[in-house]
C-alpha cells in the first residue's frame, strides 16, 4: 500500500478553471494543518492557482516544462513520488491531469478527502470514477476507504454507454454513406421549465456527440392544444425528421394522452404511443422496435453486467407509464417474475427483501434503506432526487448500502445516461425503418 492520500472534496476533487479543488475556506485551512510537515504533490496549474508554495512542506510540482521553482522539486517523473510514498504520507492535490497521472496506482492508494466540508457525503468522482467516500460527520476524523473494495459493486453506466455509442456511430455512418440522408430528432419544449431545459440540453449535447441533428422547437406555455397538435402533425409529415420527442411535463391545459396519440408511432422515440406500448405488452417486438428509453436502459445495463434475468424475482417500486409498467413488460419478456409495487403496497420492505433484483422508481431520497435489502441482491436506482445539500441522488441510501454485499446502480452515472443513450438508439431505429421504406 502506497502512503499517498489523494485529497479531494465534494466538488469532485477537480480544480475547475484553475481554481483550487476546495471552494470552502475552512477546508483549505484544514488541508494546511493536516499536511504540515509532509510532502505535497501538485500539478503545475494547481501551483499556479495557489500562486505560491505551501510552507513547512516538501513541495513537489509536476510540470512538463521542468521550469525551476525555488524551494520546490519540479519533476515529470512519477517514480520520485512513488518511492517517497513507500515510506511517508504523500498528499496529492490537483486537477484532472494530476489525478490521471496516478490512475494506474489507484488500487494501491489510500484515498481520502478533506473531511470537514459540511457537504461531505458520498462523492463519486465524475472524472476518475475510482472511489467512493463515506459520510464523515466528525470534522477531525479522516475516514479512508479504498475504492477497490467497492468498485465491483457499483454498476456504472459509462462502459455500457461507451460501447453502445461506438456501435451506434458506426451504424449511423454506414447508413448515411449509403443513403446520403442524415438522421434528425425534433424536440418540442413547451414553456421554460428549468429541469426540462437541462434535459433538453443534455439531449442536444449527446446528439452532437453522435453526429445526429437535434432540432429544438421551443413553444410558449400558452400554446393551445390544437396548435401543439398541428405542430406535431407538421413534424410527422416532415421526411427530414425521423424522431419526435415532446419534453414533459406539459402545461396542465394540454392533455398528454392526446399528444401521445398525435406523435406518429413511427417517430415515437419515447415510445408513449399506445400502438408501441401495446406492441411491447403483447410481445410483438423485435430488434427494430421502439421500447421506452428508461426501462430499455435498465435492461441493457443489467445485460452489460451479465445479470441473468430468467427466473429471477424482481420487485419494481413505482407504477408509472414511463418507467415501472414498461419495465415490468420487458422483465416478463426476459422470463423474470415481476411484482409491481407502489405507495399502497403492504409490507413493501419484506417483499423487497425476498427479491433478487429491486428496481426503485419512487423519487424519494434514501427511500431504500437496510430494511429493504439482503445480501446478494442487485439494486437498480432509477430515482432522481436532490438530497439536503442540494446534490443529485437516487432513491437508495447509497452510502450505507454500498458497504453491504450488493450491486447498485449509482446516481448520478447510472440509469440517467442509459436513458439518454436509449433515446438515440430509438431515434436510429426510426431512421433505419424510414430508410428501409425509402
Ligand atoms: P412517478 O413520479 O410518477 O411516481 C412515483 C411512484 O412511486 C408512484 O407509482 C408511487 O406509487 C410510488 N411511491 C411513492 N411513494 C411510495 C412509497 N412510500 N412506497 C412505495 N411506492 C411509493 O414515477 P416515475 O415517473 O417513474 O418517476 C420515479 C422516479 O424516477 C423520479 O425520481 C423520477 O425523476 C425518476 N426517473 C428517472 C429516470 C432516469 O432516466 N433515471 C427516468 C424517469 C423517471
Image: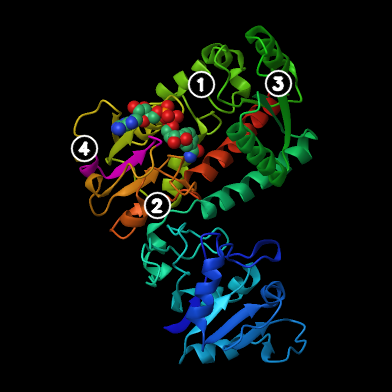
Question: Quarter for ligand 1?
Answer: top left
Do labels 3 and 1 touch, CB within 8 Å?
A: no
Stretch in magenta: 351-363
Which residue is more in the foreground, 203 or 69?
Answer: 69
Q: Earlier in the sequence, mark 2 or mark 4?
A: 2
Q: Position of residue 344 (x, y in %)?
A: 26, 25
Q: What's the CA distance linking mark 4 and mark 1?
A: 31 Å
- Tag nearer the camera, 3 or 2: 3
Question: Which label sits in the foreground, 2 or 4?
Answer: 4
Q: Which circle marks residue 351 in the picture?
A: 4
Q: CA distance from mark 3 to mark 2?
A: 43 Å
Q: Identify the mark nearer the N-term, 1 or 2.
A: 1
Measured in 3D between alpha carbons, the distance from the residue under mark 3 to the one under mark 4, in whole angstroms, is 44 Å
Which of the two labelled residues, at mark 3 and mark 4, occupies the earlier sequence position?
A: 3
- In terms of secondary structure, where does tag 2 sit? loop
Spot occupied by residue 305 in the image (x, y as percentages of width and height): 42, 53
The residue carrying mark 1 is 276
Q: Which residue is found at the position 33% from the left and 35% from the top?
A: 316
Per the image, the residue denoted by label 2 is 306
**Are the residues tagged 4 and 1 within 8 Å (C-beta)?**
no
Residue 166 horizontal/vertical position (percent): 63, 50
From the image, state whether disc 3 or disc 1 is nearer to you.
3
Amino acid at each position: 500500500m502506497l502512503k499517498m492520500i489523494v485529497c479531494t472534496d465534494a466538488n469532485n476533487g477537480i480544480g475547475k478553471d484553475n481554481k483550487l479543488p476546495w471552494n470552502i475556506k475552512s477546508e483549505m485551512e484544514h488541508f494546511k494543518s493536516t499536511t504540515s510537515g509532509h510532502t505535497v504533490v501538485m500539478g503545475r496549474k494547481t501551483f499556479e492557482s495557489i500562486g505560491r508554495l505551501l510552507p513547512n512542506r516538501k513541495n513537489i510540482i509536476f510540470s512538463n516544462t521542468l521550469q525551476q521553482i525555488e524551494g520546490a522539486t519540479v519533476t515529470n517523473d512519477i517514480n520520485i513520488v512513488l518511492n517517497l510514498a513507500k515510506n511517508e504520507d504523500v498528499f496529492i492535490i490537483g486537477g484532472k491531469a494530476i489525478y490521471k497521472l496516478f490512475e494506474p496506482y489507484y488500487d494501491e492508494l489510500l484515498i481520502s478527502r478533506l473531511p470537514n466540508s459540511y457537504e461531505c457525503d458520498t462523492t463519486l468522482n465524475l472524472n476518475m470514477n475510482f472511489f467512493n467516500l463515506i459520510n464523515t460527520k466528525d470534522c477531525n476524523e479522516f475516514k479512508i476507504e479504498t475504492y477497490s473494495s467497492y468498485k465491483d459493486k457499483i454498476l456504472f453506466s459509462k462502459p455500457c454507454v461507451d460501447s453502445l455509442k461506438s456501435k451506434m456511430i458506426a451504424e449511423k455512418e454506414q447508413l448515411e454513406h449509403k443513403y446520403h440522408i442524415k438522421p434528425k430528432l425534433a424536440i418540442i419544449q413547451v414553456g421554460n421549465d428549468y429541469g426540462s431545459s437541462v434535459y433538453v440540453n443534455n439531449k442536444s449535447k449527446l446528439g452532437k456527440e453522435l453526429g445526429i441533428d437535434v432540432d429544438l422547437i421551443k413553444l410558449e406555455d400558452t400554446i393551445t392544444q390544437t396548435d401543439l397538435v398541428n405542430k406535431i402533425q407538421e413534424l410527422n409529415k416532415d421526411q427530414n425528421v425521423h424522431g419526435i420527442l415532446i419534453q414533459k411535463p406539459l402545461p396542465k391545459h394540454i392533455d398528454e394522452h392526446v399528444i401521445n396519440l398525435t406523435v406518429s408511432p413511427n417517430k415515437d422515440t419515447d415510445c408513449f404511443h399506445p400502438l408501441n406500448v401495446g406492441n411491447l405488452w403483447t410481445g410483438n417486438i423485435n430488434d427494430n422496435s421502439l421500447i421506452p428509453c428508461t426501462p430499455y436502459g435498465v435492461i441493457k445495463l443489467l445485460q452489460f453486467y451479465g445479470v441473468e434475468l430468467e427466473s429471477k424475482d424482481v420487485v419494481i417500486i413505482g407504477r408509472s407509464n414511463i418507467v415501472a409498467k414498461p419495465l415490468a413488460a420487458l422483465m416478463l419478456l426476459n422470463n423474470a417474475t415481476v411484482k409491481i409495487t407502489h405507495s399502497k403496497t403492504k409490507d413493501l420492505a419484506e417483499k423487497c427483501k425476498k427479491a433478487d433484483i429491486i428496481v426503485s422508481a419512487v423519487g424519494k431520497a434514501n427511500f431504500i434503506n437496510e430494511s429493504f435489502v439482503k445480501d446478494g441482491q442487485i439494486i437498480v436506482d432509477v430515482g432522481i432526487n436532490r438530497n439536503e445539500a442540494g446534490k443529485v441522488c437516487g432513491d437508495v441510501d447509497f452510502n450505507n448500502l454500498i458497504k453491504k454485499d450488493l450491486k447498485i446502480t449509482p446516481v448520478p452515472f447510472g440509469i440517467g445516461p442509459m436513458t439518454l443513450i436509449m433515446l438515440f438508439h430509438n431515434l436510429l431505429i426510426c431512421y433505419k425503418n424510414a430508410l428501409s421504406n425509402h
